[in-house]
Image: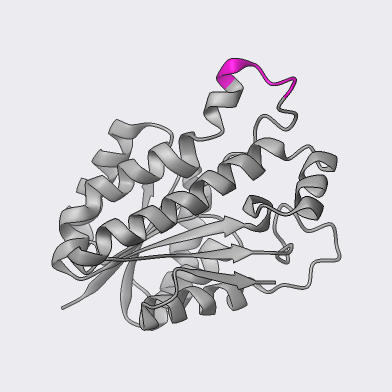
Amino acid sequence: MAKTLVVCGYGPGISSAVAQRFGREGFAVALVARDAKRLDAGVAALAASDVEAIAFPTDLSDEAAVARMIEAVRAKLGPISVLHWNAYAGGAGDLLRADVAGTRAIFELPVTQLLAAVRASLADLTQSRGAVLVTNGGFGLDDAKINARAVSFSAMGLALGNAAKHKLVGLLAEQLKPMNVYVGEVMVLGAVKSSAWDDGTAKLEAATVADAFYDLYSSRTAVTRHVG
């Protein structure tokens, strides 16, 4: 039976490499983000590699829109086998100066909306013995040097969101294990080439991260893999 990968938060870099990696393994790919032009370019790139892909422009911060998107993917590509969550928010860089709304928003994409996507696709994931794969960042680790860097980079909100997402991955991994649904994350510990964090010195290839995701999916053992 054909398998379907849903890439939430698609863009150049990690999510593009994940789409290509799973596409080579025979997955049909749903690309999800707000930028329709970016999605169309992604679909064209995958088609050039003989990968079936469809764009689903969606505001992932809207829970109802997420549910509609999952239904649309199911209707066009079939039941969902893998949900890849690559969306994140980087607000509230200074936690002492951020307003209440900005502080609450820290958790919207990495926690609330990730959960919404998991709930919406859970029936498919259970039936297919599927997987939830999450992109995370090293700022989410509780380490004094990393915390200092997050403060100096005005990335405190991102760090807090990543930490909450890391905990959520662990909790979901335990809760969904009896349902034969695998949950795992790749914690990226350095800047990826051509990403928003690349200041010209990044050495990490997006394909390396994608390979880590596919290895996690295939082995279904470790919950977290550090790359970088």
Q: Is residue 58 left or right of residue 100?
A: left
Does 14 appear in magenta?
no
Examine the image and state in which quarter residue 189 appears.
Answer: bottom right
Q: Position of residue 178 (x, y in %)?
A: 20, 65
**Count of marks overlaid on the render:** 0
Position of residue 33 measured from the top left corner of the image (x, y, whole percent): 46, 46
Q: Taking 102 as reference, is 138 above or below it?
A: below
* Location of the N terminus (image quadrant): bottom left
Q: Main secondary structure of the magenta part?
A: loop
Q: Residue 165: x percent and y percent?
A: 50, 48
Boundaries of the magenta span: 96-101
Observer-nearest of 112 and 171: 171
Q: Is residue 88 visible?
A: no
Q: Is residue 98 magenta?
A: yes
Please give left or right for residue 127 compared with residue 10 in the image: left
Q: Quadrant of residue 88?
A: top right
